[in-house]
Structure formats: C-alpha cells, structure tokens
Image: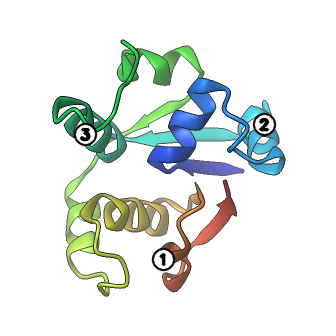
Amino acid sequence: MKLLLDSHAFLWWLAGDPKLGAAARQAVADPAATVFVSAATIWELSIKAALGRLDLGGADLVEEIAGNAFVELPINARHALAAAYLPRHHGDPFDRMLVAQAQIEGLTVVSRDAALRAYEIQILPA
C-alpha cells in the first residue's frame, strides 16, 4: 500500500498520539507500506509554527521523514496544475495539493478530514 500522510496524521504519528486510529497506525507501521510525506505538509506545518499557531517541540520535520523511513514527496509541475483545477470542495490549498498528489501518484491519503471525501481519492481514516 502507498500512503500519503495528511498533516495531522503525520504529527499524530510523530507524537505517538492515540488520536491516530489503530487501523491507520497499523497501516503506517506495515513494513510492506510505502509512506509519503508531501513537501506541502512540511510547508504548512512550518508556516503554522512560524506564526506561533503550532508548537513542534523542536522537531526537525525533514529529519523526521527519513527517521521514520518515510519518503519525501516533492511538489512537481503536474501536481501544481492538477491542484489548480480541482473543484473547490476544500478551501485549504495544502489539502488540495495532497488530493492532486494522491490522484497523480496513486496514493491513499491518511486523514480525518471529512472534506476530502468529496474528491476521487482513496482515504484511510486517521
């Protein structure tokens, strides 16, 4: 399975937070799974931290990707174009980028965001 972590799922995984459900935690921990973290997620979380809206506790998010055997997913021009043309079911541009990346790369998004269900993507509830 190829998974793409939404921002909250990534943070919950890093913190060992029980908000990340058992099925999602098991899927992320599965050695056969490839787990991606988008550059959009790092960008979003870093902006929130810089604005004082999120405390990362000193975590280096880039290091956490490698340290958890996740794969960094860059944003490319195809992702950007697809995100621009998505219906506005979701107002958050970072989440629309995740949708575009999931569609293009064939990924299942690990998320608790109900608004993502309006898009044609696979979702594993976080």
Q: Which residue is mark 1?
A: 115
- Looking at the image, which residue is at 38% across and 23% down? 56
Horizontal placement of 7 versus 109: left or right? left
For mark 1, does the 10 Å Cα neighbourhood hold few (<14), some (14 to 19), or many (20 or more) residues?
few
> Residue 48 got which mark?
3
First along the sequence among labels 1 and 2: 2
Residues at circles 1 and 2 in contact by the CB criterion of under 8 Å: no
Query: Which secondary structure lies at badge 3?
Result: helix
Residue 67 placement: quadrant: top right
Horizontal placement of 33 versus 11: left or right? right
Q: CA distance from mark 1 to mark 2?
A: 28 Å
Q: Which residue is mark 2?
A: 32
- Looking at the image, which residue is at 27% across and 49% down? 75
Q: CA distance from mark 2 to mark 3?
A: 32 Å
The image shows residue 23 at horizontal and vertical percentages of 82, 50
| Mark 1 residue type | Ala
Dot in front, 2 or 3: 3
The image shows residue 83 at horizontal and vertical percentages of 27, 71
First along the sequence among labels 2 and 3: 2
| Mark 3 residue type | Lys
- Looking at the image, which residue is at 28% across and 44% down? 44
Dot in front, 1 or 3: 3
The image shows residue 30 at horizontal and vertical percentages of 80, 35
| Mark 2 residue type | Ala
Q: CA distance from mark 1 to mark 3?
A: 21 Å
Query: Which secondary structure lies at badge 2?
Result: loop
Q: Residue pushed farthest front? A: 52
